[in-house]
């Protein structure tokens, strides 16, 4: 199992914005420069995060991005679900009709259990936890 670059960069972006919570919009270029990520690539990551309601976008010369809610209310699961297009590890755990063997698959329970464990763990960590290194979840 691998986490995509899109997710890793999305996390870095969201952490950077969370660090500036309450200070107004953060320009994309500043984060791109600070994180060593192409602005163009970061735009592709930020668009779905904003569409999912995790970010507010402010246009104009003083524009940028800010969290749509307190960092204590945004979990790693929220971010990963957007950047990985869901938290399902396999098609069959998302949709029983995705596999004709789903009804009597002896390993489906293993994958569903792993998926539940990953989801539970990611839901237990907020951006606030990351900022203050309170990862005793």
Image (cartoon, rainbow, N blue to C red):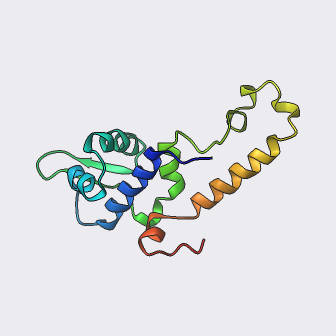
* Image coordinates for residue 34, horizontal then vertical, percent: 26, 59
* Image coordinates for residue 30, horizontal then vertical, percent: 21, 55
* Image coordinates for residue 5, horizontal then vertical, percent: 45, 46
State left or right for residue 61 relative to residue 106.
left
Front-most of 61 and 108?
Answer: 108
Instruction: Judge whether 106 appears above or below 110 on screen.
Output: above
Residue in view at x 58 percent, y 58 percent: 122
Residue 69 appears in which quarter of the rendering? bottom left
Residue in view at x 43 percent, y 55 percent: 11
* Image coordinates for residue 97, horizontal then vertical, percent: 74, 26
Of the 4 image quadrants, the one containing the C terminus is bottom right
Question: How many labels were placed on the picture?
Answer: 0
Instruction: Judge whether 111 appears above or below 19 on screen.
Output: above
Instruction: Judge whether 135 appears above or below 11 on screen.
Output: below
Residue in view at x 39 percent, y 57 percent: 12
Front-most of 122 and 34?
Answer: 34
State left or right for residue 81 relative to residue 37.
right
Residue at the farthest left position? 61
State left or right for residue 26 relative to residue 50.
left
Residue in view at x 65 percent, y 42 percent: 89
Front-most of 96 and 37?
Answer: 37
Residue at the farthest top position? 100
């Amino acid at each position: 199992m691998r986490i995509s670059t899109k997710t890793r960069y999305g996390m870095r972006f969201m952490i950077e914005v969370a660090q500036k919570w309450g200070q107004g919009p953060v320009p994309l270029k500043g984060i791109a420069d600070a994180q060593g990520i192409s602005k163009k690539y970061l735009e592709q990551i930020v668009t779905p995060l904003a569409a999912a309601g995790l970010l507010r976008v402010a246009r104009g010369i003083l524009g940028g991005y800010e969290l749509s809610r307190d960092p204590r209310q945004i979990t790693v699961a929220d971010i990963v679900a957007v950047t990985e297009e869901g938290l399902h590890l396999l098609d069959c755990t998302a949709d029983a009709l995705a596999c004709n063997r789903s009804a009597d698959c002896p390993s489906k329970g293993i994958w569903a259990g792993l998926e539940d464990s990953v989801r539970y763990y990611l839901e237990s960590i907020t951006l606030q936890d990351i900022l203050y290194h309170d990862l005793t979840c």
